[in-house]
Structure formats: structure tokens, C-alpha cells
Image (tube, helix red, strand yellow):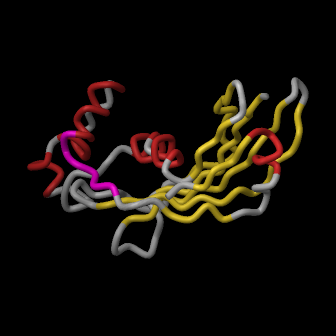
């Protein structure tokens, strides 16, 4: 069950808070192919299972940016926000892809709120540390520090 924050004060109270982990999500070849079509990135390590099987990863892997993009829906499984008029993705401070996500693997998101501070325009800026974990792998697939702005 996701944590709930109501309004700017609710968001401010999350500074330093661990948000926990989501349920596992399987990464299918269909999802990888759909992402490849959407981004015009059809590199064989992602979309050609036969060739990828003989490649450096032993099979097809998810795009790094696909893994990063899944932070958005998975974050909604960690935190629900109400009492604000608008939220925007303000950017990223850091993103790394320490290990690949093999097709067929399951991932989950771990989130922690590093800081929340007031900004002009009756809003707050929230810095959130994300780690995308791969089931059975000690090394994360993605670590990212995201910046969000929320306005009353």
C-alpha cells in the first residue's frame, strides 16, 4: 500500500523518509519491443533474442532508458499525493545503469526522499533517490536521483 502525502505540508514531512519497495514487475520482450518502436532504438541486444543469445549478456536486455522510464509508474505504487494542483518532473541529478535487466527478469523500485524544500510559486521541490532492483541480483539495474516540483 502506498504512502499518502496531503498537500505541501504533507510532502515537507517526507524529508528523509524511506518509501519502501514496490511489488516485482516482469520485463517482457513485448515491453522491450514496444519501447524500441517508441524510441526508434532497435539495437539487436534488445530486440533480436537469437542474436542476443550469442551476445555479451546471453540474451536480450531491456534498454537502460526503459528501466528508467518505469520509475514513473512504479513511484506511484510507493507514494500517492493529494491536495496539490500540479506536479512536474523537474529533472535528474544522477542516473547510472550498473547492471542490465535481462528480458524475463523481475524488477522493483526502492525509493527514499532525500529532501523536500519550499520553492517560489507556492511549491516544494522534492529530491528522491531511486534504486531499481533486479530479483536475484545484488547489483542494481538503475540508480537515479530525481527532482520533482509540486505546487498548491
Residue 9 vs residue 93, the one in the foreground: 9
Q: Quarter of the image holding residue 123?
A: top right
Q: Is residue 122 left or right of residue 70?
A: right
- Which residue is found at the position 87% from the left and 24% from the top? 121
Q: Quarter of the image holding residue 7?
A: top right
Q: Is residue 15 left or right of residue 53?
A: right
Residue 44: x and y in percent read: 22, 41
Residue 39 vs residue 106, the one in the foreground: 106
Residue 128: x and y in percent read: 68, 51
- Which residue is found at the position 72% from the left and 43% from the top? 6
- Which residue is found at the position 14% from the left and 56% from the top? 53
Is 110 above or below relative to 49? below
Q: Quadrant of the C terminus?
A: top right
The residue lying furthest to the left in this view is: 50
- Which residue is found at the position 49% from the left and 55% from the top? 97
Q: Is residue 129 left or right of residue 42?
A: right
Residue 50 vs residue 144, the one in the foreground: 144
Is 8 above or below relative to 60? above
User: Which span is picked out in magenta?
Assistant: 25-30
Q: Is residue 147 left or right of residue 24?
A: right
Is 12 above or below relative to 7? below
- Number of numbered discs on residues: 0
Residue 149: x and y in percent read: 74, 34
Residue 82: x and y in percent read: 66, 37
Q: Quarter of the image holding residue 120?
A: top right
Tell whether position 71 is magenta: no
Amino acid at each position: 500500500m502506498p504512502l499518502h502525502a496531503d498537500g505541501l505540508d504533507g510532502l515537507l514531512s517526507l524529508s528523509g523518509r524511506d518509501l519502501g519497495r514496490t511489488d516485482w514487475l516482469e520485463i517482457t520482450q513485448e515491453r522491450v519491443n514496444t519501447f524500441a518502436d517508441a524510441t526508434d532504438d532497435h539495437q539487436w541486444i534488445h530486440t533480436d533474442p537469437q542474436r542476443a543469445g550469442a551476445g555479451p549478456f546471453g540474451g536480450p536486455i531491456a534498454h537502460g532508458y526503459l528501466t528508467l522510464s518505469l520509475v514513473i509508474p512504479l513511484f506511484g505504487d510507493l507514494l500517492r499525493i493529494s491536495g496539490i494542483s500540479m506536479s512536474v518532473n523537474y529533472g535528474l541529478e544522477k542516473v547510472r545503469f550498473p547492471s542490465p535487466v535481462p528480458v524475463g527478469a523481475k524488477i522493483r523500485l526502492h525509493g527514499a526522499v532525500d529532501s523536500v524544500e519550499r520553492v517560489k510559486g507556492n511549491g516544494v521541490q522534492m529530491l528522491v533517490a531511486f534504486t531499481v532492483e533486479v530479483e536475484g541480483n545484488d547489483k542494481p539495474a538503475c540508480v537515479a536521483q530525481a527532482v520533482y516540483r509540486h505546487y498548491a
